[in-house]
Image (cartoon, coloured by chain):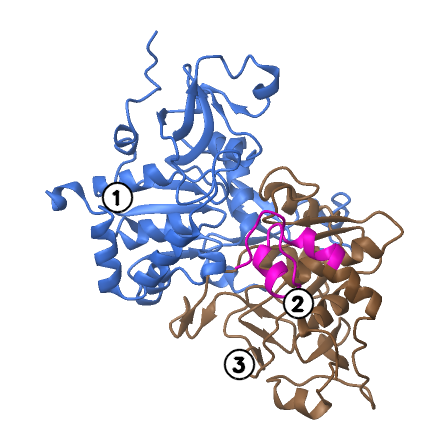
Chain colours: A brown, B blue
């Protein structure tokens, strides 16, 4: 039995993927990537800048977005996180909807910054907790942002990894496909195959994702939680067990 | 001295935004909710709303009240409260025309607007379905070729790049901390509001407070102030961003937004909620 929560495992997995990145930005509705970015920052000997969008003082930016996108355009941003209502085996992501355009079966919010950031940020980590054939599909209904581009297209960025609550995939840029890197405790290659709508590559033996060490768990609960409480007080309280002074637990 | 830019109230400001106008609204801290309610009470119709670059309750409410003909956006969402119900219904049924975009495209189009240039190139986007659904997004070859500067395509003779048309909205509407008697508007950290005001043909602004000292002359505020030459009208609206937050002034009212989301699940529930809040055209209310 593991003595950590799935969220804490995911924080550890993502923090490892961020190793060596100098500037990390975290978009909205992303408490787990946000916690992972702060953990990666705490672990790094070199200075790491983290900007959590939604926080009162979002790190190294002044305004809401022009700064962020211009930084990304110039290659100053090393890592970012994207998700999708659908993600397919070629790394295409869909944040827009299902059915004919503009989303006759299901309509989501819109493509946000994905159609740009996916192309210019070198290490885009796809994060989608729900790992089912509904979310990980053979082919997305709408491409908000494409996983790969033809060789004549200037594209310094793209997918790096896909983290779900079942496993970690790495993206193989040459093949334009995902490769299964490890499965989380309790999962197998078969359980991952059964719940994935796309085909993927995998090694002969698939290792188990290493969980967070006791030292890391302590760090997450004591050092990271108070920091991620802005802007995610509910996540800090309910998942990491931290309530800010003067704030009633909900 | 009276200044014609300082308007007596929010209703007068809302009257400056005509039906059918291309209306730019701002996503962040600086959302003119009281003016939005005044637009709804005025019975505004067929607005072409451009969210810079996304929106939550403001676009949702304008759509819910039937004020919107076209929504040009990178995303409308109630964030942690989930989907924006009226937006989703209107887009699915086609009641509102949608121009789907991506955040940096909208910013770039406003930046082109403020520079007075007809279009602007942007990286990314190639291979996105947005290019299929936006007739006004085009791909050209970098006219300087693959040697055209440090950010040109590395191994390509053609270096294809997307170009976007400039946006010059008829009106920008936003809420700011302070204005002075001249109509200079202090925006604090929300520096994107400058780009929006520069690009817009007119800017209508509500503020928490109108101050006596000139905001341009004060070194502490001058750098984060939009000069009055860009501002069409200012109305005082204390707590004018509620139920959304205004940093330095007040937090948002999440419970209120949650009640809205619950009510708006059905069209009947939404109609009742709007009526209870007095968010119906004044003629209909009388």
Question: In the rendered view, does A12 fall on the left or right side of A101?
Answer: right
How far across and how far down the image is residue A165, in percent?
Answer: 65, 77
User: With respect to residue B144, does B202 lie above or below?
Assistant: above
Chain designation of label 1:
B
Q: Which residue is mark 3?
A: A134
In this rendering, the answer to whether B225 lies above or below A53 is above
**Residue at image coords 54%, 50%:** B103
Q: Nearer the viewer, residue B111 or A135?
A: A135
**Which mark is first along the chain, 2 or 3?**
2
Tell me if A218 is positioned left or right of B92 in this view: right
Tell me which segment is drawn in magenta: A222-250
- Residue B114 picture location, percent across and down: 51, 32
For the point 51% across and 17% down, the residue is B215
Dot 3, crowdedness within 10 Å: few (<14), some or many (≥20)? some
User: Which of the pair B131/B92 is nearer the observer?
Assistant: B92
Q: What chain is tagged by disc 2?
A: A
**Which label belongs to residue B40?**
1
How far apart are the alpha carbons under marks 1 and 2? Answer: 40 Å
What is the distance, in whole Å, between disc 3 and disc 2 at their CAs? 16 Å
Q: Is residue B80 above or below residue B181?
A: below
Q: Which quarter of the picture shows residue B33?
A: top left
At numbered mark 1, what does the secondary structure look like: helix, strand or loop? helix
Q: Label for residue B56? A: none
Residue B143 visible within the image: yes
The residue where tag 2 is placed is: A126
Q: Which residue sits at x=66%, y=67%?
A: A126
Q: Nearer the viewer, residue A84 or B117?
A: A84
- The quadrant where residue B243 appears: top left
- Residue B129 lies, in percent from the top left, at 52, 65
Extreme-bottom residue of the structure = A190
Is the N terminus of chain A in the top left, top right, bottom left or bottom right quadrant?
A: bottom right
Chain bearing tag 3 is: A
């Amino acid at each position: 039995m593991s003595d950590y929560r799935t969220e804490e495992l995911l924080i550890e997995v993502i923090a490892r993927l961020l190793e060596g990145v100098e500037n990390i930005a975290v978009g909205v509705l992303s408490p787990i990537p946000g916690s992972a970015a702060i953990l990666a920052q705490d672990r790094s000997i070199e200075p790491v800048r983290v900007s959590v969008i939604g926080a009162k003082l979002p790190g190294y930016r002044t305004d809401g977005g022009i700064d962020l996108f211009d930084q990304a355009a110039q290659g100053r941003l090393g890592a970012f996180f994207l998700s999708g209502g659908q993600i397919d085996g070629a790394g295409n992501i869909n944040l827009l909807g299902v059915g004919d355009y503009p989303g006759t079966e299901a309509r989501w919010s819109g493509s946000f910054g994905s159609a740009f950031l996916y192309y210019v940020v070198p290490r885009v980590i796809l994060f989608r907790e729900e790992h089912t054939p509904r979310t990980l599909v053979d082919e997305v209904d709408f491409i908000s942002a494409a996983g790969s581009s033809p060789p004549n297209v200037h594209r310094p960025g793209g997918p790096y990894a896909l983290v779900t609550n079942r496993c970690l995939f790495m993206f193989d840029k040459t093949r334009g496909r995902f490769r299964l890197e490890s499965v989380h405790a309790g999962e197998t290659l078969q359980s991952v195959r059964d719940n994935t709508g796309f085909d993927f590559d995998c090694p002969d033996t698939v290792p188990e994702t290493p969980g967070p060490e006791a030292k890391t768990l302590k760090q997450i609960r004591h050092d990271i939680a108070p920091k991620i409480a802005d802007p995610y007080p509910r996540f800090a309280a309910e998942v990491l067990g931290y309530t800010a002074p003067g704030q009633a637990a909900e | 001295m009276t200044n014609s830019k300082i308007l007596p109230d929010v209703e007068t400001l809302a009257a400056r935004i005509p039906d059918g106008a291309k209306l730019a609204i701002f996503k962040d801290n600086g959302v003119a909710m009281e003016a939005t309610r005044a637009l709804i009470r005025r019975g505004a119709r067929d607005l072409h709303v451009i969210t810079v670059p996304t929106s939550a309750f403001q676009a949702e409410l304008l759509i819910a009240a039937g004020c919107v003909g076209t929504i040009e956006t990178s995303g409308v969402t109630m964030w942690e409260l989930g989907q924006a119900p009226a937006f989703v219904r209107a887009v699915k049924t086609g009641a509102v025309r949608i121009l789907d975009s991506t955040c940096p495209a909208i910013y770039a189009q406003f930046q082109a607007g403020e520079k007075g240039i007809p279009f602007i190139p942007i990286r990314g986007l190639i291979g996105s379905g947005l290019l299929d659904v936006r007739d006004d997004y085009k791909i050209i070859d970098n006219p300087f070729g693959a040697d055209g500067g440090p950010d040109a395509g590395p191994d390509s003779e053609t270096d294809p790049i997307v170009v976007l048309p400039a946006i010059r909205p008829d009106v920008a509407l936003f809420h700011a901390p302070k204005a002075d008697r001249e109509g200079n508007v202090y925006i604090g950290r929300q520096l994107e509001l400058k780009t929006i005001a520069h690009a817009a043909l007119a800017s209508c602004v509500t503020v928490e407070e109108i101050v006596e000292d000139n905001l341009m002359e004060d070194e502490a505020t001058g750098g984060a102030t939009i000069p009055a030459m860009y501002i069409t009208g200012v109305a005082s609206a204390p707590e004018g961003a509620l139920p959304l937050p205004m940093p330095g002034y007040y937090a948002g009212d999440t419970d209120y937004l949650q009640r809205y989301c619950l009510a708006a699940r059905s069209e009947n529930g939404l109609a009742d909620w709007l009526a209870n809040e007095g968010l119906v055209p004044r003629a209909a209310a009388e």
